[in-house]
Image: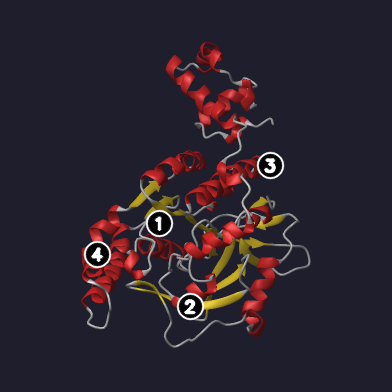
Amino acid sequence: MERDVDLVPLRPVIFTRLHELGRHRIDSFHLEDWEMLSRELEVSEEEAKRLIGVISGYNRNEVPSWMQARTAWDLLQEQRLNPRMITTGSEQLDRLLGGGVAPGTIVEFSGAPGIGKTQLCMQLCVNVQLPDALSGIQGSAIYIDTDGAFVVERLREMAEAIVEKCREEADSDDTIYDDTVRGALQQFNVDEVLARIFHFRCHDYFDMLTVVHLLPEFAQKRNVKLIVIDSVASHFRYAFEDDLAKRARIMNSFMQKLNACAIENKIAVVMTNQMTTRVAAGEDTRLIPALGTNWGYSCSVRVNLSWRNDTRIALLFKSPSRGQSTAPFIVSAAGIRDIISMDTLIEPEKDREATLLMSSLLADEGDDSILADDSQPVTQDESA
């Protein structure tokens, strides 16, 4: 199968030069051509060999392990043996998701600026490290930061809160933990939590492609159980305004690699997405998640975060196993928590505002759209 060289994470200047030379296909690169490529790109021989190795590596035909068939019975047994999920810190939000964020799935949280998307991502990075004694996964986290919103002091506050909770559990006379478990909880500390969150700052889509290409090996060596991308829309959204077909190809390749990494390594992938204004003839304008219709098919679970008066509301509008529903939550000094005064979930069909939002999120997005951010000029785009 022919594959485009645009799918390979190379520096933009290399992309440009290869296209000028008419070298568009991956299968046109062979190791014995390194001398010619060195002259054409005006790079060293070592760099030319490395480039050919990277490009040709994207042309393998073997079937990866995650594509091999497994029976439904095997999958069911695996779920029963590994039922643990990553808690959000809010019981209501966990119930909305079916118990928390499940390993091996891709979850999207969309919403307007300031609604709490980044706060939720940082909370998950802390909670994925909860000790086994507290039914935690006890894994590490990778945080891919595209917006520069990662604030380590805020992360420390959340870590301090969760460590304090663990120590209270260990010291409580009401718990039935043995001395080994109590010792593990007491040893759980803030420095350890922060040391197991790996931060990557990506300044453009090329940085994102490069990091995702390196994720499988990096994750295996460090027991990574959560990958956060905050946000996925920042660089992809405006990098290909003149070539949306190219954006779709690159994003599909990007998601395929993420999905393979998540399934093979039992890693939860959480991404944030921006909101955009959709304008259609004869209809009112409405806010929808950015990046178009096809993008939504790539995510296992999609949740929209919004304000209801002064209350943050999470709306689950896509899930393979859960019905559409809503849940309130708060962002406190300690992190993501429940609203004590509001019990249980609100069914969307009984909630007029949720129904209106649901209809917007699920509306057909096949036509051209006018897309705009709160802080960005209006630009013409299509659903990719």
Which circle's residue, 3 or 4, is located before the other in the chain? 4
**Viewer-nearest residue: 260 or 337:** 260
Which circle's residue, 3 or 2, is located before the other in the chain? 2
**Residue 362 in sight here:** yes
Q: Residues within 10 Å of mark 3 (few under 14, many from 20)?
A: few
| Quadrant housing residue 6 | top right
Q: Amino acid at mark 4?
A: Ala
**Viewer-nearest residue: 80 or 350:** 80
The disc label shown at residue 270, or none = none
Which circle's residue, 3 or 1, is located before the other in the chain? 1
Separation of marks 3 and 4 at Cα, in angstroms: 52 Å
Q: Is residue 345 left or right of residue 162?
A: right
What is the tally of numbered marks visible in this picture? 4
Q: Amino acid at mark 2?
A: Gln
Which circle's residue, 2 or 1, is located before the other in the chain? 2
Tell me if label 3 and label 4 are in contact, CB under 8 Å. Answer: no
Separation of marks 4 and 1 at Cα, in angstroms: 32 Å
Q: Position of residue 292 (x, y in %)?
A: 66, 55
Residue at which label 4 appears? 184
Residue at which label 1 appears? 149
User: Residue placed farthest to the right in the image?
Assistant: 282
Label 3: state its secondary structure. Answer: helix
Label 4: state its secondary structure. Answer: helix
Q: Position of residue 304 (x, y in %)?
A: 56, 68
Q: Position of residue 133 (x, y in %)?
A: 32, 68
Q: Nearer the viewer, mark 2 or mark 1?
A: 2
Q: Is residue 178 left or right of residue 82?
A: left
The disc label shown at residue 245, or none = 3
Q: Amino acid at mark 3?
A: Ala
Residue at which label 2 appears? 92
Separation of marks 3 and 2 at Cα, in angstroms: 40 Å
Q: Is residue 160 left or right of residue 325?
A: left
